[in-house]
Amino acid sequence: MNSSLLAFAAIACYISSTLYIAFRLFRRDRETVPRAVGIALGLSGVVFHSLFLYLTMFTGEGVNLGFFSAASSISWIILVLLMLSSLSKPVENLGILLLPLAAVSIALQLQYPSVHFLSPDTPWILRLHVLISMLAYSLLTLASVQAVLLAIQDHQLRNRHPGGFVRALPPLQTMEVLLFEMIALGFALLTVALISGFIFLENMFSQHLVHKTILSLAAWVVFGTLLWGRFRYGWRGQKALIWTLVGFVVLMLAYFGSKFVLELVLTA
């Protein structure tokens, strides 16, 4: 099966899903436009994307976790979580931002097939550590997009401008509950990833891991503080947005920043 055709099919489905969700979101009579179509297009893209990743990442030399392959796989995990969640919760509108980003990640992986293998003899516990880390990054990315939408919704309601976009979103309280559910689960996975790293990796503060370790710990502190502030002081709105985005930026720098320098800058 041709990996390029799968990539183009996934991109086409993601863009079509984005356009459909946006079309439905900004219509006044959106109740007459079935949301299932946008979800189905997104899920179709996820299927094509998964086949593309399978062909390009899993080789005889091991699992390719190069910079663009990792970005594409994380975007795939994000959309799997988003599309499956949208079957029971009204969260598919997050796809307006996340679906195009996934399409871009596929295009970049296709254009720049960077290589960084996780060898076949890698211990299973290290593979599990990598998987949990990627799940944590994906969930906290979802939470960051949710926080941005929540901030827009809160601002519009405070200024008494509940336009079509805001009316299409779930109630503010529901949006807040979804946000902190994502953050709590992502924080739990990040905690497990850090603990497993310290236990099973030889030296988390070795030269090639020190920046990733320190920044991951900093992100863990940021998200932990946010959850504590929510529980203790009821943090919400602008404060929750700022803490969420700071934690997200630090976490992305921890993973992609170090990979970018090690794989693309130093090897150029």
Image (spheres, rainbow, N blue to C red):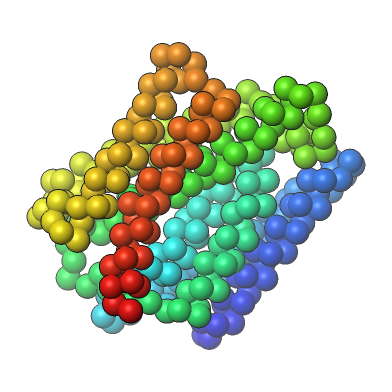
Q: Residue at the spot x=18%, y=66% of the render?
A: 122
Q: In this view, does 230 lie to the left or right of 254?
A: right
Confirm whether residue 220 shows in the render: yes
Q: Residue at the spot x=23%, y=48% of the render?
A: 213
Confirm whether residue 64 shows in the render: no
Q: In which quarter of the image is residue 48?
A: bottom right
Q: Quadrant of residue 228?
A: top left
Q: Is residue 261 left or right of residue 74?
A: left
Residue situated in front as seen by the camera: 50 or 76: 76
Residue 6 in the image, given as x and y percentages of width and height: 57, 77
Residue 66 in the image, given as x and y percentages of width and height: 35, 71
Vertical relation: 133 (above or below) 5: above
Count the numbered circles shown: 0
Vertical relation: 78 (above or below) 261: above
Vertical relation: 204 (above or below) 265: above
Vertical relation: 137 (above or below) 170: below
Residue found at the very far top of the displayed protein:
233
Residue situated in front as seen by the camera: 31 or 108: 108
Q: Residue at the spot x=67%, y=71% of the render?
A: 12
Residue 27 in the image, given as x and y percentages of width and height: 86, 45
Q: Residue at the spot x=33%, y=51% of the render?
A: 254
Q: Quadrant of the C terminus?
A: bottom left
Q: Is residue 183 left or right of residue 149?
A: left
Residue 204 in the image, given as x and y percentages of width and height: 16, 51
